[in-house]
Image (cartoon, helix red, strand yellow):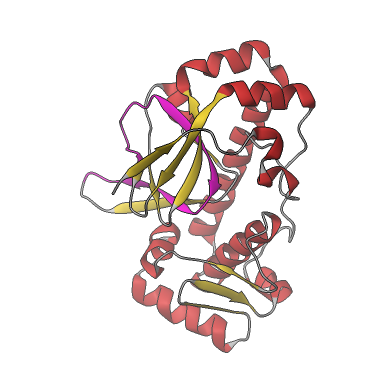
């Protein structure tokens, strides 16, 4: 597991993520500020721990490319996956505001990350109220997602849980340009999905087979193929089939 530090490569006004439908537009003064706020870029190899639960961190990140996973480790060693990191996600806000991370973040694939100095977070709130609002907005989006996830884990059956998770992942992947037609990368393990949804690995595997046999979705060799997006969403009791635009930090 290694970090590879790089000087700044992608200027914020040339950021490829800004062109994606998943993100709200920047104003010119916001771009100027973000170019100053950003200290550089970093490459993280698969398996790299970007943040450790309980640890302090000097840096914050935005995922520019690649995928990762967020999780908490229980005292008995069991793991609860609480989310998947995708391009455009801001990582480390807990450490920036609360002093330390309350969950861990690990790179699943090679990731390219924009790096920000945690010590300058207050400058953002002091000098860029619209950027500060964007951070607050992202925190609200995360709260909304955790509410949906908790309702899914607590009240839905296995077929509904997995249909909801695959539908949500594909919609987000499509909005950030990762999807090609009806396919997108899904390089996680079935165990990761099982951990996220409170299911056993065996139950997860059998349920994925049911979705495949029903002609809704298949997941194999790190690729998700959605065969019927509308029915997949109906099966997962999904509220909306579109990813709402959100701020990009």
Q: Quadrant of the C terminus?
A: top right
- Is residue 226 one of those drawn in magenta? no
- The magenta span reads 50-75
Q: Is residue 123 left or right of residue 243?
A: left
Tell me where residue 205 sits by quadrant: bottom left
Q: Is residue 42 or residue 105 the one in the foreground?
A: 42
Residue farthest toward the bottom in the current orientation of the protein? 213
- Is residue 69 one of those drawn in magenta? yes
Q: Is residue 245 visible?
A: no
Q: Is residue 149 or residue 185 the one in the foreground?
A: 185
In the figure, 127 relative to 41: above or below? Answer: above
Q: Is residue 75 visible?
A: yes
Residue 165 at x, y percent in the picture: 56, 63
Exactly how many numbered labels are in the figure? 0
Residue farthest toward the left in the current orientation of the protein? 76
In the figure, 99 relative to 67: above or below? Answer: above
Q: Is residue 111 left or right of residue 217?
A: left
Q: Is residue 224 or residue 45 the one in the foreground?
A: 45
Tell me where residue 169 sits by quadrant: bottom right
Q: Residue at x 46, y 49 (%)?
A: 111
Q: Is residue 101 left or right of residue 16?
A: left
Residue 103 at x, y percent in the picture: 38, 39
Q: Residue at x 62, y 67 (%)?
A: 236
Q: Residue at x 35, y 71 (%)?
A: 201
Residue 56 at x, y percent in the picture: 34, 26
Q: Residue at x 78, y 26 (%)?
A: 28
In the figure, 202 relative to 192: above or below? Answer: below
Residue 55 at x, y percent in the picture: 31, 30
């Amino acid at each position: 597991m290694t970090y590879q530090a790089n000087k700044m490569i992608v200027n914020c006004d040339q950021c490829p993520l800004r062109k994606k439908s998943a993100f709200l537009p920047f104003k010119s003064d916001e771009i100027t500020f973000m170019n100053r706020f950003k200290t550089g870029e970093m490459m993280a190899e698969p398996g790299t721990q970007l943040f450790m639960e309980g640890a302090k961190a000097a840096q914050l990140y935005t995922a520019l490319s690649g995928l990762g996973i967020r999780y908490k480790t229980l005292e008995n060693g069991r793991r609860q996956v609480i989310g998947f990191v995708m391009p455009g996600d801001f990582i480390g806000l807990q450490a920036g505001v609360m002093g330390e991370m309350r969950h861990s973040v690990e790179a699943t694939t090679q990731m390219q990350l924009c790096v920000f100095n945690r010590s300058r977070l207050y400058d953002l709130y002091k000098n860029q109220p619209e950027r500060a609002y964007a951070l607050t907005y992202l925190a609200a989006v995360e709260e909304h997602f955790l509410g949906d996830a908790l309702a899914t884990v607590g009240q839905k059956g296995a077929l509904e849980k997995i249909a909801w998770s695959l539908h949500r992942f594909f919609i987000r992947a499509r909005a950030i340009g990762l999807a090609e037609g009806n396919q997108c990368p899904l390089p996680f393990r079935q165990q990761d999905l099982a951990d996220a949804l409170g299911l056993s690995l065996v139950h997860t595997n059998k349920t994925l087979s049911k979705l495949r046999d029903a002609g809704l979705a298949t997941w194999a060799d790190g690729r998700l193929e959605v065969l019927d997006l509308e029915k997949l969403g109906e099966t997962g009791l999904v509220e909306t089939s579109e990813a709402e635009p959100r701020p990009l930090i």
